[in-house]
Amino acid sequence: MCGIVGYVGHRQAQDVVIEGLRRLEYRGYDSAGIALVADGALATQKRAGKLANLEKAIADHPLPASDIGIGHTRWATHGAPNDVNAHPHTGGSRRVALVHNGIIENFAELRARIEADDHVMLSETDTEVAAQLLELQVESGIDLATAMLRVVRQLEGAFTLVAVDADDPTRVVAARRNSPLVVGIGEGENFLGSDVAAFIEHTREAMELDQDQVVTITPEGVSVLNFDGTPAEGRRYHVDWDLSAAEKDGHDWFMRKEIHEQPRAVADSLLGRRTAEGHLHLDEMRLSDQELRDVDKIIIIAAGTSFYAGMVAKYAIEHWCRIPVEVELSSEFRYRDPILDYSTLVVAISQSGETADTLQAIRHARTQRSKVLAICNTNGSTIPRESDAVIYTHAGPEIGVASTKGFLTQLVACYLLALYLAQVKGTRYGDEIDQVMAQLEEMPAHIQRVLDDAPAIYEMAREHVDTRSVLFLGRHAGYPVALEGALKLKELAYIHAEGFAAGELKHGPIALVEAGLPVLCVVPPAGRDQLRDKMVSGIQEVRARGARTICLVEDGDDAITPYADRIVRLPRVPVLLQPLVAVVPLQLFACELATEMGHDVDQPRNLAKSVTVE
Ligand code: F6R
């Protein structure tokens, strides 16, 4: 939540900062602002609303040339999203400007202390407290990095702070605790960003920082200190994607581009997972075979769409490995006093690797001696860094706020984890694992086939612009797909949508069904237990009550035809893998319906991509 940029070097800082904010805008778009240092003074501009408002304000009142600056795009926590509360905030004498991501929990007490000393606060934010404190420190005659160290020791909560001092145009200083910040390493210039997208246009060399560190960038170099003042080293790494991955590539929305990238993303996510002998091999597993054999329970924790990937993982792991699996929302996990010990494996699924609820949950698990394995898309992010093992999903940057390729590649990582555990624990024969891997390797082609039918889905979506409510039904692995279809519709089209386990319908929700209500039904493949037949009964029941049924059915299954108002064909795949194809029409449906309704698909209202506050 909130995007932060810092720059010092030889370019026009305004251009670097605004371009960086554009690439980070998915992290929050309640307001945007910039501060430059020029001729020994701060030049700032900030506006409520999207970045375009800030750009207009700068066009009307140009900022001076400068080669050092900071910027911010906000997802509001403390204080309404207006001009005054927009970042950057400055101290009372406008010497220091500061931007912030996170929440300073003891801000009320600090604010009272500052106001008691006759300093006037202009905004309702917690951030201004940090700006005031920092300015008071530099005015006492110390440098910005030392001042930052003194300030962070007074703060409680989670924060990334980035600041400039009008009296020192050579450096940008930042601090991080439980909130993301990466350094971009250039030649004669250096960058700071909430993630690498902020500077990918200029450099692919990056440095990750640990918790509780202060970093200073100058044109010549980067230096890192721990909060106790001891020197530290950041870990350098090369970013394995480039600017083109952060562009829309001719699509109207990042989300649509990312939906269409899914065949490639799934293929990348499967790449290099087998040794020459055909054994499964996971790069950053870091847990020994013995440690995995000792696992007698798995708890999967995640939020939102990632939680639904976890629900699918439960079916796969229990079926292939015979290990009991619980799936829990990370925001609930540590408050119920979960039973954890060294033989519990906690699997944290997070596209961003920064979700605060999930991060706190894994920290709790580790204090209870459980091992934590992260499934994550973002290299260098906090959750994989604090985990014992990682499976990176390799989806490439996901910029649309609604997760799509992030979800599909999480599913792939979950299947890989399940098969790996089956291999280590010996619960499946090698040839069975090979067979599933071969089926997974066919999935990119199957997903492409679903995408080739996009025009028909788009047409169906356009027919639903006046719809105010939609239900989604699924069973078994199709149940999380129904939940995900409903979530996509809620967050993009802002209409009432609910996903149900089809068997639960009769226990209450069927009362919602009335004439003309669209009900999207994810029909399980034929041949697995009586899942498909039970689903057909459920479809008949809602149709008998006037619902319009839109059925996602595998090729060749005609039993549904008499009960379906519309049929969407899916490739024939095994039931456990069906989510990989079944969710795609639901993504296309939500994307097109929201577009037709005139909504901003990439930046839905009230949301942010990376939820770094609890
Ligand atoms: C919905 C969506 C969110 C995220 C959730 C978790 O489209 O994107 O529900 O899935 O906020 O985020 P991560 O996976 O980054 O932890």
Image (cartoon, grey):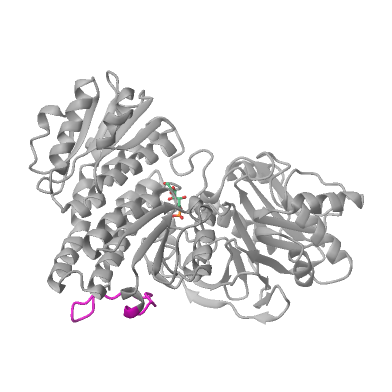
Q: Residue 301 at x, y = what percent? A: 43, 57
In this picture, residue 65 sits left or right of residue 308? right
Q: Residue at x 86, y 54 (%)?
A: 93
Q: Residue at x 45, y 61 (%)?
A: 339
Q: In the image as oriented, which residue stretches furthest toward the right? A: 118
- Main SS category, magenta section: loop
Q: Residue 106 at x, y = what percent? A: 74, 54
Q: Is residue 200 visible?
A: no
Quarter of the view holding residue 589: top left
- Is 43 above or below relative to 485? below
- Is 530 above or below relative to 194? above
Q: Residue at x 61, y 71 (%)?
A: 190
Start-end of magenta stretch: 274-290
Residue 279 inside the magenta-drawn segment: yes
How many numbered dots are placed on residues in this image?
0
Q: Is residue 473 visible?
A: yes
Quarter of the view holding residue 376: bottom left
- Is 609 above or below relative to 588? below
Q: Residue at x 32, y 31 (%)?
A: 471
Q: In the image as oriented, which residue stretches furthest toward the top? A: 515
Residue 77 inside the magenta-drawn segment: no
Q: Residue 409 at x, y = what percent? A: 33, 58
- Is 466 above or below relative to 351? above
Q: Residue 498 at x, y = what percent? A: 36, 34
Query: In terms of depth relative to the viewer, which is nearer, 339 or 56?
Result: 339
Query: In terms of depth relative to the viewer, which is nearer, 218 or 13?
Result: 218
Query: In terms of depth relative to the viewer, which is nearer, 289 or 41?
Result: 289
Query: In terms of depth relative to the viewer, which is nearer, 545 or 425?
Result: 425
